[in-house]
Image (cartoon, coloured by chain):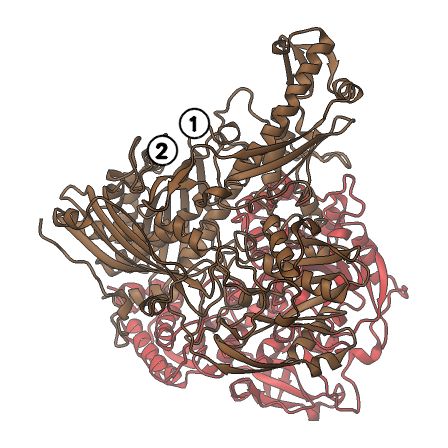
Chain colours: A red, B brown
Amino acid sequence: MALLSLKVNSTWRALRSAEGAPALDVIREELGLTSTKEGCREGDCGACAVLVGEHVGDMVRYGAVPSCLLPLGTLRGKHLLTLEGLVEGTEDGLTPVMRAFLAENASQCGFCTPGFIIALTSWLAEPRVPDLAGALQAIDGNLCRCTGYGAIRRAAARLVERFKYLPLEPMARLRALVEVQVLPPSVLEFAAESTREGSSVPRQNSETTSLPRGEVAPHAVVGGGTDYYVRNPEPEKGFSPLLTQILPEFGQIRYVSDRGERWLEIGAAVTVRDFFASPVVRGEVPGIERFETMFASTLIRNLATVGGNVVNASPVADITSMLLALGAQLVIVPETGTEDNTAALRLCPLEQFFLGYKTLDLSAGEVLKAIRIPVLDEPSSRRFSFEKVSKRKNLDIAAVNTAISFRFEGGRWKDVRVSLGGVASVPMLSTEAMDVLEGASCDVLDGKSLAGLARKAAQAAASSISPIGDVRGSAEYRRRMVYQLILAHFVRLFEASGIAEELFP
Amino acid sequence: MKTENIGKKNNVSFERAAPVHTARAADSINPSMVIPESLPNVLGQTQYIDDLPRPAGCLQAVVRLSDSAHARILAIRTEEALALDPSVRVILAKDIPGTNQIGFNKPDEPLLPEEEWVYWGQPIAIVVAATRPLARRAASLLRIESEPLPAITDPREAAARGEFIFPPRTIACGNTQEAFSRCAYVVEGRVESGGQEHVYLETQGAIAQVVDGRRVHVISSTQGPSGVQRAVAQVLGVSMNMVEVEARRLGGAFGGKEDQAANWACMAAVASWITGKPVELYLNRKDDMRATGKRHPYSSDFRIGADKDGTLLAFEADYYQNSGFCCDLSAAILARTVLHATGAYHIPNVRVTGYMCRTNLPSFTAFRGFGAPQAFFVIESAMDALAQKMGIDPVELKRRNLYKEGDRTYYGMTLERVRASEAVERLLKKVDYPSLKERIAQFNATHRLEKKGLGLIPVAFGISFTKLQMNQAGALVHIYTDGSVMVSTGAIEMGQQVARKIALIVARTLGVPVAKVTVQRTTTLTVANTVPTAASTGSDLNGMAAKIACQEIRGRLVKKAAELLHALPEEIDIKEGAILQNGSPSALTWQALIEAMHASRQDLSAHGFYATPFLEYDMRTERGRPFAYHVYGAALVEASVDTLRGTYSLDSVSVVHDIGESIDPSTDRGQIEGALAQGLGWALLEDLRFGADGRLLSDTLSTYKVPDVSFMPSSIDIEFLPPIENPTTPYNSKAVGEPPLQYGIAGYFAVLNAIRAAVGRSVAYYNLPLIPEKVSDLLASTPCTQEPMEPQRGQSFNETISKKGA
């Protein structure tokens, strides 16, 4: 087995563990870095969060991820930081984030504390003006059962106050954070090592940067791992899946032209964070960024991939629901080397990809490479909305979700697509609701007629489904929520029309 | 915001949060001088069970859990598991060297089942191997043949079949039947409250090691080392002096590790005894959630009556406690339920009965509040229903009926230093209740898609273990020859910062700076026969024991100092490490005094013992004084409901709380905020779900959601009532762990009232947690959403309000 090189805190290490081993086990058992805690092994508590630094273009960026769901192989050539490494080089053995926790008495039993410190350190490393809302969002994937979050909020407020003047340019930001000892000097070492030409930094092996050639790999394909390791928390020793995140061609967002049509192509390994952050995606789907925080948590979004969300085939997958409404097509390639063989790729409309519960139109030896969204002539004419209900607003799996995408042409609804999640064994389109809306005439300021249309569409969507009941909601609840959430799309998109008054006089 | 105080290496200084109240006695403890016990926490250096360096040759144990609710065991085949690896060992009930029994309140809890298992998720075998994944794989290879047996999961069904763990318990006072006939208003109804998973972030675990071939050392993540010691001795068949149990800092417990930590410590000890190797058993989250007990679900009936002015005359309740498969702590939990039946209200005629219903579910156990929250939810539901019936603001009804000074409770305790009205009135003034109500009404009149509601709860929570013999504690204090002080008590540090409080108490009593004091971990060697750190009494009992030990040493020190200074003992005082004579600093230093003590061969150690005075209770008559004192307080919650999506959010919480004289306001505030979060979670979010077949459906953190940062309201205002005398605790402090958990119940009623604002009529629905699905069900019957899709109204929210003539 090839050695796997990564920088662990201030030291480059060569590890023998399998590419598919959950990083948490290696961090605790092999590296002995026990500040990283195991709380749930499904990314729901954040106790195992670590900071991962990587080279992106000319820059180095750091993000917090749950190490229980992190395939070790994706750390090749990257920088792994735990609390043991954060304190290196500090004058009093503490970082300002740790001091804020002490000052506010924000650590009670302490088991969750390292994860919170990692998440807040990651937040400070984001090149944005720190504010309390941002700090709280950064810890939306961390559970604390002791404090009720009051003292943690106060610690975060302290950090906002102290660090409001950090530079916004990414590298200057990192240097400043090292200066104030939020981040250790190893961060700048890593940046220099990564950028120096011909440096000793072990680069990714060439055979792992593209798909293996000429053989059908029988092994699993793992994207971010955020679903895979929930189902398989303790994979067999030596587990070595194909990791799409280390394939550069799986990580791009770009425009492509194919058979006279333009598409926005999103690599299957693009993380959910990068998907929502992409100016191109935001340009094609105006307002999509508003729905980012409805997907999982910051920690998960830093790791989960767009392709993984699709291939996991959860009937209630949030990104998949959005992509369905956007008319996405999947780019599927053979697992055996393809970069120069465009003929081998196969396109599959997303709605035809799901054959049954967790059953995909994807043969052994095939892998999802990218997702294409059709490009509109006038992207700004696209109207888009996403709705979801769950027991808890953040980091909870939906009982029901739905997305809608359309545009107006000549006073009529055009290219309407309505998706529904959580109402069948697969994520689906509501052709019934789409039929109601497509071609309907529309005055965006006529609340009365919009309300009538909303009710008709909602009725069509709700009456055409046969959901089941489970721990996340009864069948009746799901049906009712489909109705209500379709109305919610209308209320969100046509607020100025006075539709709310019409719907609920 | 103050600037940060950057400390020096190895001597970290820190600032504490601004004190919540400033009215403090002149000689009060200054918490800013405390060395933060949480320092290792923020560095990630605290070693929980699975972080400890493993002893050489340490084996890992996992448990194989049952996969049905009730079955007869026909055979357990181990061949395949054993063939996996030479290190694999399988331990079954027959292998247990001592007595296969860990139930101490009732012998109904075998460590491993012998003939049948009685709940889904019950450990039926211990599998040990060199690594945890190997052990887990081996456990999955056990072939278990069984024959299904019928299972009961519903407490009322169990009650109908007479499946009681102990006979029902009734407390009665006055004549409810006669009183109801005098009432202008009588309301009855049913109340359901769900269970609650502890979600301590550190799951259950222990490391056991046989030392010198016959003694056993156990490190357990437990709230009760003595209980673990007794259980381990019993299953090994050795005497307790052969077993040492040590508890370090716990990664959370909340009651879940009060009695139920013993199971895992015993299994590790048995495995170590049999293999001769050290054994660690650390449950993964799923096994922990499936196998261990949670807060008891209750199904209850109430009947409440008032005269035409709204003065309560009578209350009756039947509590069907879903106890799970065995007794565990269920009897004590039921005791706290029936002793909190009327909440913070005085009711002259009361008759309440609790039933411990045996079901084929995990043994429900202690969880912060310990049976009281279930009782509070019933009485608050009854008050809500009565106010709805009378057409008055529940806040008015509540104010009219709060406990007053000198009131005699229905169990015969005369209440002293009652602060229920003080708390409520202060709270209402603080939030400017009349204008707040007006503002909410205005908002609701002008918003279609969002409605707001308020909920208020007053609390009177009794402090002391309801089992009299448990109200005792011990402490060991040493002063070493360099003048530093060590204290070890029975109190377990699990995040509640009891160590910090005890350090402050010791420093204050001895008269040394708190930096000189260290609180060491709890072991059965330093303090014996301890009670679990539970019932909010950790710092009361152990703090008093430590104080008594310190007073004894201090007496010797004062005598010695007087001798050295040629003064009278009455002229000597010791404060902050200075020896004062007639109030002025003397030439004698602390260090010199300690050295002189040692040189003259005097004891610098003491053991303190405390037993709470004035407690008495007659179980036969159900009369007495079961509590040393009550903690009072009140909370008001404001919530918003999104009527379109059926979701809600918590806007703000205001609390006025009786903390006595706080030993450390920052710690107490943290306890109140933490308890509030758990209470709100229980009332609104945490949906513990079992299938009809007894399988736990919410067995992961992805299906069982606990409050996260955004669930909690952004505004939480906590005010302490002024200090008050409280003679049975250290320095007039008051217990704080459990009472504020009840505040979460106000969140339930805030959401319910917002729903009422949306539907425009009375809704009597008392079934927590009030998850969005239930909110949506309730909203669905509103005119607003009476669309073609109108759903069926559930049977569960039919109104049961009945009016009786005056």
Q: Can you say which quadrant of the picture contains the C terminus of chain A?
A: bottom left
Assess disc 2: are there few (<14), some (14-19) or many (≥20) residues with their C-alpha within 10 Å of its C-alpha: many
Q: Secondary structure at mark 1?
A: loop
Assess disc 1: are there few (<14), some (14-19) or many (≥20) residues with their C-alpha within 10 Å of its C-alpha: some
Residue extending farthest top: B566
Q: Are marks 2 and 1 on the same chain?
A: yes
Q: Dot 2 corresponds to which residue?
A: B419
Q: Amino acid at mark 1?
A: Ile
Q: Tag 1 or tag 2, which sits nearer the N-term? A: 2
Instruction: Please tell me whether residue B793 is drawn above or below residue B576 in the rendered image.
Output: below
Q: Which of the two residues, A203 or A236, is positioned nearer the viewer here?
A: A236
Q: Dot 1 corresponds to which residue?
A: B724
- Tag 2 near tag 1, CB within 8 Å: yes
Q: Amino acid at mark 2?
A: Arg
x, y percentage for residue B207? 70, 58
Q: Secondary structure at mark 2?
A: loop
The quadrant holding residue B489 is top right
| Side of A135 where A176 appears, left or right | right
| Side of B380 where A406 appears, left or right | right
x, y percentage for residue B777? 31, 68
